[in-house]
């Protein structure tokens, strides 16, 4: 276990960091907002340092008898407002910097939505598509056992993220139970049969669609007939597409790693999903045209980057036809792209706001586990969307160009207040606890 030794002696905005990548981008945004809030350097340092960064090595005996060692991470950034909370990604190239940045994003996200959680993120540097089901199960089991001393329902609660799903959470739950920690609240995003909530699987994508509708209407649009392009057709992209389609929007473009397809008359999300589930590539979908380049550039009203971080670059931003960007992924827009979009007057609904439905639903799953209760899907959906609406109201009062910084400022203020009340920092922004 290694403790993160990241504690600058000067305001974070002056620190030298690698110029590109999620950590650098998060760093810039955090520096800008803490400067604006006028926080002192000691508080800025306390806010930014990760509480715990764990690196684990996972030796796997592969199906062919050879040995492979995978590296896993779990970063708990903050527990100021409650147990650390955040997903677990299985993806080639997962590294400590990205996981740290993503853990910070979770801290800001849970605080923004008023959840009693801190922020964390985990991951394993592996390609789940290159692993057999037995190997995936074993990597998950080894990872869970390795991080088990630092997780728990009231300590740190993992969930799915890129490359993991409810099966992964079932395996994590089982590994923890076999090691003596039998509690469904140890992870969220589990299968319903094992204590998962009925709305969790759809929650992030449905939430993205809901926030997209709110933002579009705020800008004077109507969702019926609005043309939407979505990058990423995993659980976030698919559910966002399906929900927007149900609400009357037209899905005119969909893209994933195989390419991008368009149909100005509208694509049926359920048909595309059935096509992919049957083992086909998105790009071969027969009832749409293939386009070169990123789907974010197609002619439409709203674009939803719901794949990976950093896909909305300045070059893509310069070619965007849409009038609104809604961030379904974490960190999809680079700061350089943000500058281009600002100059072009295209607002961005930030990830913290737009994709918060997932962790809000995780909170309700965790609460149901604690209560040994099961809510109906309708009830949970209503509560998740109501929570998103509440947060949206506080953002919508601001000019669109301020949405990201305002969301981050609200989150940072809540955490600073909590830390001041606990006596962990000496000063804060709003004066609570001083
Ligand atoms: N991975 C999701 C996110 O980035 C959900 C995290 C959770 O439910 O804890 O928000």
Image (cartoon, helix red, strand yellow):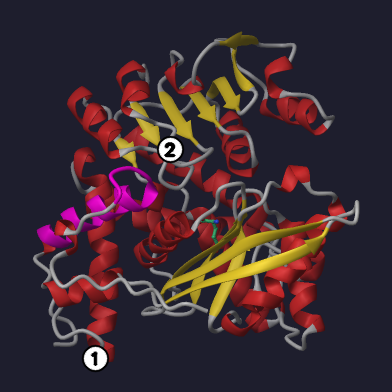
Q: Nearer the viewer, residue 257 or 304?
A: 257
Where 270 falls versus 186 (above or below)?
above
Q: Which residue is mark 1?
A: 423
In this view, which residue lies farthest toward the front?
Answer: 66
Quarter of the image with the C terminus in it: bottom left
> How far across and how far down the image is residue 157, in percent?
58, 73
Q: Which residue is mark 2?
A: 212
What label sits on residue 325 in the rendered view?
none
SS at badge 2? helix
Using the rendered view, name the quadrant where residue 66 is placed: bottom right
Where 386 falls versus 365 (above or below)?
above
SS at badge 1? loop
> How far across and how far down the image is residue 71, in percent?
62, 61
Where 91 falls versus 304 (above or below)?
below
Instruction: Please state the extent of the stretch shown in magenta in the rendering.
Output: 18-36
> How far across and how far down the image is residue 67, in percent?
80, 59
Side (left or right) of 370 relative to 414: right
Using the rendered view, name the quadrant where residue 30 is placed: bottom left
Magenta stretch encompasses residue 136: no
Residue occupying the point 19% across, 47% down? 398
Q: Nearer the viewer, mark 2 or mark 1?
A: 1
Side (left or right) of 103 relative to 380: left
Displayed-image quarter of ligand 1? bottom right
> How far across and how far down the image is residue 191, in percent?
77, 62
Disc 2 and disc 1: Cα gap in Å? 39 Å
Q: Nearer the viewer, residue 245 or 222?
A: 245
Decide which of tag 2 and tag 1 comes sooner along the chain: 2
Q: Is residue 191 visible?
A: no
């Amino acid at each position: 276990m290694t403790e993160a030794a990241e504690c600058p002696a000067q305001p974070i905005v002056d620190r030298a960091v690698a110029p590109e990548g999620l950590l650098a981008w998060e760093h810039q945004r955090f520096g800008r907002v803490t400067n604006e809030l006028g926080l002192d350097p000691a508080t800025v340092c306390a806010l930014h340092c990760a509480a715990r960064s764990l690196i684990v090595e996972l030796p796997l005996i592969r199906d062919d008898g050879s040995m492979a060692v995978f590296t896993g991470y779990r970063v708990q950034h903050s527990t100021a407002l409650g147990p650390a909370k955040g997903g677990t990604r299985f993806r080639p190239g997962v590294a400590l910097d990205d996981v740290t940045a993503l853990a910070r994003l979770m801290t800001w996200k849970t605080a923004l939505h008023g959840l009693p959680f801190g922020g964390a993120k985990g991951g394993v540097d592996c390609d789940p598509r290159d692993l057999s089901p037995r190997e995936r199960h074993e990597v998950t089991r080894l990872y869970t056992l390795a991080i088990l001393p630092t997780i728990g329902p009231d300590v740190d609660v993992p969930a799915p993220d890129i490359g993991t799903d409810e099966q992964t959470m079932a395996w994590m739950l089982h590994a923890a139970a076999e090691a003596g920690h039998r509690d469904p609240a140890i992870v969220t995003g589990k299968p319903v049969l094992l204590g998962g909530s009925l709305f969790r699987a759809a929650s992030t994508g449905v939430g993205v669609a809901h926030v997209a509708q709110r933002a579009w209407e705020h800008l004077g649009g109507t969702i019926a007939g609005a043309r939407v392009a979505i990058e990423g057709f995993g659980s976030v992209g698919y559910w966002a597409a399906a929900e927007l389609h149900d609400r009357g929007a037209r899905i005119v473009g969909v893209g994933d790693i195989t390419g991008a397809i368009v149909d100005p008359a509208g694509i049926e999300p359920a048909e595309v999903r059935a096509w992919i589930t049957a083992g086909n590539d998105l790009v071969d979908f027969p009832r749409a045209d293939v386009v070169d380049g990123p789907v974010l550039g197609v002619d439409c009203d709203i674009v939803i980057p719901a794949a990976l971080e950093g896909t909305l670059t300045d070059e893509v931003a310069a070619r965007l036809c849409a009038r609104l960007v809604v961030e379904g992924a974490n960190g999809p827009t680079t700061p350089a792209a943000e500058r281009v979009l600002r100059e072009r007057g295209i607002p961005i609904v930030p990830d913290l706001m737009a994709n918060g439905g997932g962790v809000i639903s995780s909170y309700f799953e965790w609460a149901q586990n604690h209560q040994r209760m099961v809510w109906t899907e309708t009830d949970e959906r209503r509560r998740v969307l109501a929570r998103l609406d509440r947060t949206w109201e506080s953002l919508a009062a601001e000019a669109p160009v301020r949405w990201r910084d305002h969301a981050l400022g609200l989150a940072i203020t809540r955490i600073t207040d909590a830390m001041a009340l606990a006596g962990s920092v000496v000063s804060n922004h709003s004066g609570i606890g001083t």
